[in-house]
Image (cartoon, rainbow, N blue to C red):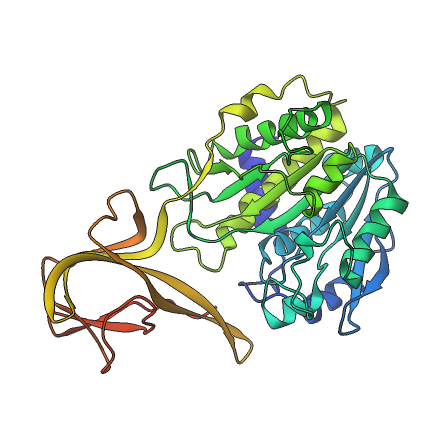
Amino acid sequence: MQIETLNSLFITHKVQTLFGRYIHTKNIKPLLRQLPKKFKVDVIGKSVLDENIYSVTIGNGPKKILMWSQMHGNESTTTKALFDLFNVLKENTSFSNKVLSQCTLKIIPILNPDGAVAYTRLNSNGIDLNRDAKDLTQPESQALRTVFDNFMPEFCFNLHGQRTIFSAGKTNNPATVSFLAPAQDIDCTITPNRKIAMEVIAKMHEMLQQEIPHQIGIYDDAFNDNCVGDTFQSHNVPTILFEAGHFVNDYNRELTRSFIFKSYITSLLYLSENEVRGSGFKPYLNILKNEKCLYDIIIRNAKVNINGIARIKDIAFQYQEVLENNSIHFIPKIEEISSNLIEFYGHKEINGKGLLIESIDKNKISVGYENDFVKLNNERLSLKLTKT
């Protein structure tokens, strides 16, 4: 599908009521109720706090694809893009007819509803569900595994979000979208089903390169059998990890949402039109690896008082995402003060020009300091982001 067509599809099918980072079950319930009859909505389990975990099933094709989002409650971009995809699949078009005649999709929009409402990675028992694939101690993990066992998918899409620290290679380019064909053994062997996942990723990468060249990464493939993707891959089901990352100034992740949406369309169309055997996996091996080369803000060459001595340093800030009054606030926090940040980049960089930097309050400038403002040469400097 041409990139112009993909862009048009996103603009015309974006769900306007889903916006920003704070998305939980209350936001999606009305949208689930509004889905037409060809979408089958089920409750597949309950969370620790007894919230429903929903699945949506559509299509009657032989290729069964299982997708799940918000395993980590604060990773909502892929969920927004799922509902944009639903809007496309509602329609009687050549794309939707092709996908739904060739595929059966079972989609879990929010696997961790308690974590979503609390805006945390973990569930209400403080457990990372993506480290519970082996022991299955949590009801959310058990619900996903039951669906996997009963549905018996041929493909899995594991949908996540990643922090602003990730770059595509050792560059100043953010890893706006990252993928992974997870390992299924400790040696990270390129197995036949990994090749299938790699081939599909290569097609999405080819599409995204037209819009965000050098901003697509491959996530670390170190094997961990407590991770769901690694576990499902080890059961010989080709599994693809999607990571929705950062685009400059897109802290609401609305631009990234569009790239994830277009990746869904591209991958589903490719799987619908082809018997994917993995022969096209090699371009995957050339995709840039994710590195951790970015901070949200770096103030370069500022004078900092350290133990009463003024020194020229670079000061790196990372935004802390804080839920307050049903919205997310981004609070700048100093992560590093160093003379050796030359291999790191800021999404925003400020030249301190050798001038003195001080706190806006009576606390000293040091690692861990949080404030929306600092003083540079005794002038107030805002580090704030607009609330989402």
Name the side, left or right, on which 217 lies relative to 296: right
* Residue 67 appearing in the image: yes
Give above or below for 218 relative to 381.
Answer: above
x, y percentage for residue 225?
A: 69, 43
Position of residue 368 in the picture relative to residue 8 (left or right): left
Q: Please identify the residue farthest to the bottom as the structure is shown.
A: 362
* Residue 199 found in image quarter: top right
Taking the spot 67% from the left edge, 56% from the top edge, the residue there is 71
Q: Residue 46, position in %: x, y?
A: 81, 67
Q: In the shown orientation, is residue 251 left or right of residue 192?
A: left
Quadrant location of the N terminus in the rendered image: top right
Q: Does residue 351 appear in this view? A: no
Q: Position of residue 365 (x, y in %)?
A: 23, 70
Residue 314, quarter of picture: bottom left
Q: Residue at x 35, y 67 (%)?
A: 333
Q: Is residue 200 left or right of residue 165?
A: right
223 relative to 369, above or below? above
Total residue callouts: 0
Q: Residue 177: x, y in percent? A: 51, 42
Which residue is located at x 28 percent, y 42 percent? 343
Tell me the residue at 47%/34% (across/down): 289
Query: Is 278 rendered above or below residue 259?
Result: above
